[in-house]
């Protein structure tokens, strides 16, 4: 008997199936998972996958936003709407609050990327989260390329790249002692283009700043930063209104926009497919610090 | 022969499938150069990455842009000029998305290669045309066959340095083919290349008029992987039971999991292990609605017509095609822990599909020398990167198949219960 059906799945379906498998493993094996939600496209896709993994039941864990206080209003508004429509619990770990109570100190340059880490770890301890879903992808950055799907963190939240657990087949080892935790990255095998194709296929709404719009920006080091309460013009700088969109959404004082006319998901896909600069390279001031900037932050317990 | 258009076209890519491959070899074989070349030729290397690598190469005093720096992401790796860990790289053509598990050739080679090969559809091994087969090439070929990677590609690299001599290529190809025949090796393709110059990588080279086969990328794009999946034996390990606590959805009880093998359809008679209870599939659900069949690697939720007590670790199969629940298994085990060896009498946690139990090592029949395939029956333990045939007894029955028949239900990991580290990977030879 010959088999005529190919029983073939597309790469997006295969990636989705793998991510759903990972999320269900976590729910089955951990006591207190939480999903890190920034309002960025990767965490939005992750939330959609969580919705699919447990349907028709509700997503069985809360979401947490590590809030630097430097937000794009469109993103906060999106976060609240999405969380409400899914009936989820939102935990906000506030960097501003941590500064006010003396847990962390504001850095002289005002950037808050690095001081997010103690705030995150503090919240993990307070709520006793044992598994944290993060939207990081291995194609983003070199240190991330060697991160496991289940990434073990000690009681200080530290990542030890030389001492990672081998991951074979679909057998993930989430065992840990009290106080330790596992970061779980269901999108490990997705690329930026995969994420956009999935957003198109699933018709997932995004915060408007991901699509081309006119914005007052200032050019610094080849990057275009929005002029707002977090980024003010320095002496000698001038701002201009340009057509831009955001390729990543992070801390509003650190994330730059790219010049773009792509105002629909299909146009964004065309643009991403043709671009010659990585998304972090194009938009993140924080990664330009040194060749090992991401590795250093991850060792300290960063996402 | 027409060659593929290399730009990952935005519209076409929605219909692509996925191929995972593992690469093995050392820096000297030109593996990093080959991967760099594949990424470059498929326009996957970005300008800022290339600039960073060029700058880093220049500051190290390298004479050429060292593409190995693209994959060696960790500080210790750059400082020591070695690759420590499996790195995952991604590229796509209009036909396929590729995931490369790039495994280092030297340090902890076996552990890393076994890890990379466990999920691979294809393994790519490199040899230097000037040196021919070396111990490492045989070891890599053996591990590929041990892990049952269905397709193997041998790239004979640096052909430019032997003046594209057909005889050199054929001698290496013949030697490798006869070695592979002893291994129960998979589908084998051998390609003469120059990774540095791009010959036979993305397009066929004019330097090899005597070579009739495809370029490497053409082969990667076209190798037939759909039939590698086991579509015969229905195996659905239950991962999680979905029971909504809600007023709108009542009386819903679904068994969530990823299809390991076989094809499930509503109306099928099924048997649930280990209870042996039988029922019928009433529906196969996804968040996008019910589907009329499920096959690997789909993640779905299965509902049954009868109320049976089913929990995580159970398996849905067919009444006349189900594994026998076993507590005694014989397996090839690759040891992965540097802190303590596997010893007879040792107790570990064992994770097999979605089931976790405890296991005791009842015997070590032999340790295998992965270079000579010699069996040392006097061995008393397995140290890091060693492989041996091991007898295990488990606390609860495993619902297992032979690994050669089913890579998902035939593989397991061993976990040290004190350190929680993953210390071993096993491939079941016999389950009874």
Image (cartoon, coloured by chain):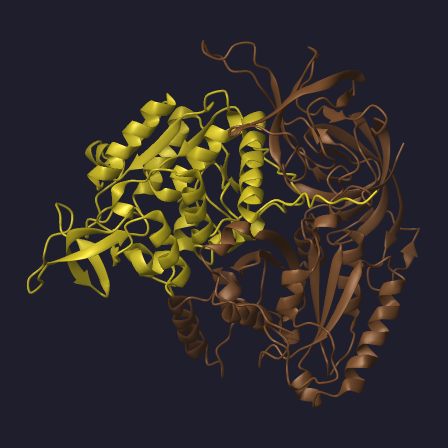
Q: In this view, does A229 lie to the left or right of B91?
A: left
> Which residue is located at x 39 percent, y 69 percent?
B47
Residue A287, visible in the rendered structure: yes
Specify the quadrant of the image occupied by residue B304: top right
Tell which residue pokes out farthest to the left in this image: A235
Specify the quadrant of the image occupied by residue A200: top left
Q: Is residue A211 above or below residue B167?
A: above
Q: In this view, does B23 lie above or below B199?
A: above
Q: Colour of chain B?
A: brown
The image position of residue A42, as x and y in percent, is: 40, 43
The image position of residue A33, as x and y in percent, is: 47, 28
> Which residue is located at x 83 percent, y 30 percent?
B323
The image position of residue A161, as x and y in percent, is: 52, 51
Q: Colour of chain A?
A: yellow
> Which residue is located at x 47 percent, y 60 percent?
B9
Residue A69, visible in the rendered structure: no
């Amino acid at each position: 008997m010959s088999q005529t059906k190919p029983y073939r799945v597309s790469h997006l379906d295969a990636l989705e199936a793998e991510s759903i498998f990972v999320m269900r493993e976590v729910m089955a094996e951990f006591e207190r998972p939480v999903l890190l939600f920034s309002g960025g496209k990767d965490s939005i896709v992750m939330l959609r996958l969580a919705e699919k993994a447990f349907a028709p039941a509700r997503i069985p864990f809360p979401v947490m936003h590590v809030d630097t206080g430097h937000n794009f209003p469109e993103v906060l508004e999106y976060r609240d709407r999405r969380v409400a429509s899914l009936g989820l619990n939102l935990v906000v770990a506030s960097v501003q609050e941590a500064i006010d109570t003396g847990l962390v100190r504001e850095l002289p340059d005002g950037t808050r990327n690095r001081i997010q880490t103690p705030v995150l770890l503090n919240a993990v301890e307070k709520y006793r989260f044992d598994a944290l879903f993060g939207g990081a992808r291995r194609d983003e950055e070199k240190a991330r390329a060697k991160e496991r799907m289940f990434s073990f963190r000690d009681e200080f939240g530290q990542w030890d790249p030389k001492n990672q657990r081998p991951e074979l087949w679909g057998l993930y080892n989430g065992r840990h002692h009290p106080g330790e935790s596992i970061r779980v990255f269901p999108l490990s095998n997705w690329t930026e283009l995969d994420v956009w194709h999935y957003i198109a296929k699933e018709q997932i709404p995004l915060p408007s700043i991901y699509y081309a719009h006119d914005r007052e920006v200032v050019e610094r080091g080849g990057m275009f930063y929005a002029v707002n309460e977090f980024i003010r013009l320095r002496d000698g700088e001038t701002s201009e209104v340009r057509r831009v969109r955001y390729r990543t959404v992070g801390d509003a004082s650190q994330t730059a926009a790219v010049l773009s006319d792509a105002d629909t998901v299909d146009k964004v896909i065309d643009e991403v497919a043709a671009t010659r600069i990585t998304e972090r390279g194009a938009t993140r001031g924080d990664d330009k610090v040194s060749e090992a900037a991401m590795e250093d932050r991850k060792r300290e317990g960063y996402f | 022969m027409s060659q593929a258009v290399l730009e990952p076209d935005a519209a076409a890519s929605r219909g692509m499938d996925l191929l995972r491959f593992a690469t093995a070899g050392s820096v000297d074989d030109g593996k990093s150069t080959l991967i760099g070349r594949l990424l470059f030729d498929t326009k996957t290397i970005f300008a800022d990455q290339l600039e960073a690598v060029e700058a880093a190469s220049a500051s190290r005093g390298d004479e050429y842009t060292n593409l190995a720096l693209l994959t060696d992401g960790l500080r210790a790796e750059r400082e020591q000029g070695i690759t420590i860990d499996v790195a995952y790289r991604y590229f796509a053509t209009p036909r396929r998305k590729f995931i490369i598990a790039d495994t280092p050739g030297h340090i902890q080679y076996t552990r890393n290669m076994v890890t990379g090969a466990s999920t691979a559809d294809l393994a790519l091994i490199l040899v230097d045309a000037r040196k021919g087969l070396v111990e490492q090439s045989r070891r890599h070929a053996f591990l590929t066959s041990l892990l049952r990677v269905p397709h193997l590609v041998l790239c004979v690299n640096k052909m430019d340095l032997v003046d594209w001599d057909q005889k050199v290529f054929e001698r290496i190809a013949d030697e490798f083919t006869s070695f592979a025949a002893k291994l129960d090796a998979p589908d084998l393709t051998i390609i003469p290349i120059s990774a540095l110059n791009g010959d036979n990588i993305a397009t066929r080279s004019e330097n090899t008029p005597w070579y009739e086969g495809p370029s490497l990328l053409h082969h990667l794009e076209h190798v037939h992987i759909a039939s590698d999946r086991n579509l015969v034996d229905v195996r659905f390990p239950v991962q999680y039971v979905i029971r909504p606590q809600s007023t709108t959805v009542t009386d819903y009880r679904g068994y969530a999991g990823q299809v390991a093998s076989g094809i499930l359809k509503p109306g099928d008679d099924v048997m649930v292990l280990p209870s042996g209870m039988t029922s019928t599939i009433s529906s196969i659900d996804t968040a996008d609605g019910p589907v009329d069949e499920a096959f690997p690697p789909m993640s779905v939720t299965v509902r049954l017509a009868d109320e049976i007590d089913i929990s995580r670790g159970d398996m849905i199969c067919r009444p006349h095609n189900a594994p026998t629940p076993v507590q005694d298994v014989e397996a090839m085990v690759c040891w992965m822990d540097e802190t303590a060896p596997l010893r007879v009498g040792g107790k570990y946690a064992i994770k097999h599909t979605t089931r976790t139990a405890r296991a005791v090592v009842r015997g070590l029949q032999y340790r295998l020398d992965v270079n000579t395939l010699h069996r040392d029956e006097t061995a008393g333990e397995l140290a890091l990167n060693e492989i041996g045939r091991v007898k295990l007894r488990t606390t609860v029955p495993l619902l297992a198949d032979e690994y050669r028949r089913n890579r998902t239900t035939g593989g397991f990991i061993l976990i040290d219960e004190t350190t929680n580290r993953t210390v071993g990977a096993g491939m079941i030879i016999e389950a009874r």
